[in-house]
Amino acid sequence: MSEQQPPAGADVLAAPAMVRRVADAMDRAAIPYTLQMLPRAMTAPEELAEACGCEVNFIVQALLMRGKATKKNFLILHSAATRVNDRILGPMVGENLQRADADFTLRFTGFPMGCVPPIGHQNRVPMLMDISLTRFARVWCPSGAPNALFSVPTLVLARAVSARIVQFN
């Protein structure tokens, strides 16, 4: 499988409230998107890629990390095919990082872990985006719900969320 044009898209108005919240944030940021509603909740990157007709590299995962000393939060946007190396990220932000747990992720972003989108959070958070994602014109991002993804232009998304593009490995 390879990158394809996004499907026609699902009706955002019929989507769950969390997905509509993300769509509203994308509209405000002028990010063009296509919503893909999945037949059921999916979390495995391979399942998501198959459902979207793409390779795993095109699936974005969002990981909330916290500074060990300052407790400052960072959202890490990376390809599902890329492993995040915590030791490399620490020097990029000036302190050692730890992964936020599921409860804190939900309280801070307003979205459950595994469904955290790159936009529409309850709190502002600096973002780091893996440079490997920029190889693709469009990527598939979490949408706030386990049965939906948004296809978005990668560089438009990076600019809209002021993501710092870095190399994770």
Image (spheres, rainbow, N blue to C red):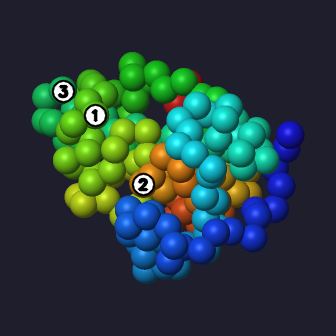
Horizontally, residue 52 falls left or right of residue 103, namely right
Q: In 3D space, how far apart are the residues under numbered discs 1 and 2 (Cα atoms)?
A: 14 Å
The residue that disc 1 covers is 102
Which one is earlier in the sequence, the residue at label 2 or at label 3?
Answer: 3
Query: Residue 78 placed where, x, y %?
Result: 54, 39
Residue type at the position of mark 1: Ala
The residue that disc 3 covers is 68
- Viewer-proximal residue, 66 or 93? 66
**Residue at (56% x, 39% y) in the render:** 42
**Residue at (26% x, 30% y) in the render:** 101
Mark 1, secondary structure of its residue: helix
Query: Residue 121 placed where, x, y %?
Result: 31, 59
Which one is earlier in the sequence, the residue at label 1 or at label 3?
Answer: 3
Mark 3, secondary structure of its residue: loop
Q: In 3D space, how far apart are the residues under numbered discs 2 and 3 (Cα atoms)?
A: 26 Å
Q: Nearer the viewer, mark 1 or mark 3?
A: 1
Query: Residue 131 placed where, x, y %?
Result: 60, 42
- Viewer-proximal residue, 76 or 140? 140
Q: Nearer the viewer, mark 2 or mark 3?
A: 2
Residue 144 image label: 2
Residue type at the position of mark 2: Gly
Mark 2, secondary structure of its residue: loop
- Neighbor class of circle 1 (other Cα within 10 Å; few <14, some 14-19, many 20+) is some
Q: Is residue 77 visible?
A: no
